[in-house]
Image (cartoon, rainbow, N blue to C red):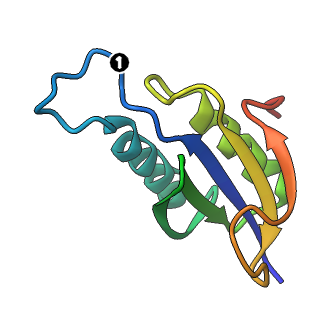
Amino acid sequence: MADIVEIHVPLAPAPDIAPDIYPFPWIDQVEDFLAELEDEGTIEVYDDGEEHGDVYIFFITGANEASLLAAASRVATLSGVPAGAFAMVTDDRAPEFGMGRRFDLPGVLT
């Protein structure tokens, strides 16, 4: 059973974006950041991120819970990421999103 942290970010458009520009550039920014952490061996990206209702969810694994929550907190503090992010600690047997323990982000970075 592997720990998985779901990073839930409010699906809010970036401020001051022109109508003809992609309104969620922070999604690509988070994906790039998580890919860098994966390349460093800090975490693993468990699955592609996806829109779920009014949030966008990123999935990370491959480290202990504290390290995964620290990475999630770093995501929440990236420039342009909407406020209100939270993490759900779950595992690979959870039947659906949002099943597990909730942690508001950013948390205490260790």
Q: Nearer the viewer, residue 6 or 38?
A: 6
**Mark 1, other Cα within 10 Å: few <14 / some 14–19 / many ≥20:** few
What is the quadrant of residue 45 in the picture? bottom right
In the rendered image, residue 60, in percent from the top left (x then y), is placed at 63, 62
In the rendered image, residue 48, in percent from the top left (x then y), is placed at 46, 68
Q: Nearer the viewer, residue 41 or 74?
A: 74
**Which residue sits furthest right?**
101
Is 52 on the left-hand or right-hand side of 107? left
Residue name at image x 79 percent, y 84 percent? 93
In the rendered image, residue 61, in percent from the top left (x then y), is placed at 68, 66
Helix, strand or loop at mark 1: loop
What is the quadrant of residue 53 in the picture? bottom right
In the rendered image, residue 42, in percent from the top left (x then y), is placed at 63, 55
For the N terminus, the quadrant is: bottom right
The amino acid on which the numbered mark 1 sits, given as a three-letter code, is Pro
**Which residue sits furthest left?**
20
Residue bearing the label numbered 1: 15
Count of numbered labels shown in the rendering: 1
Residue name at image x 46 percent, y 22 percent? 79
What is the quadrant of residue 110 in the picture? top right
Vertical relation: 20 (above or below) 17: below
**Which residue sits furthest front?**
53
Is 95 on the left-hand or right-hand side of 11? right
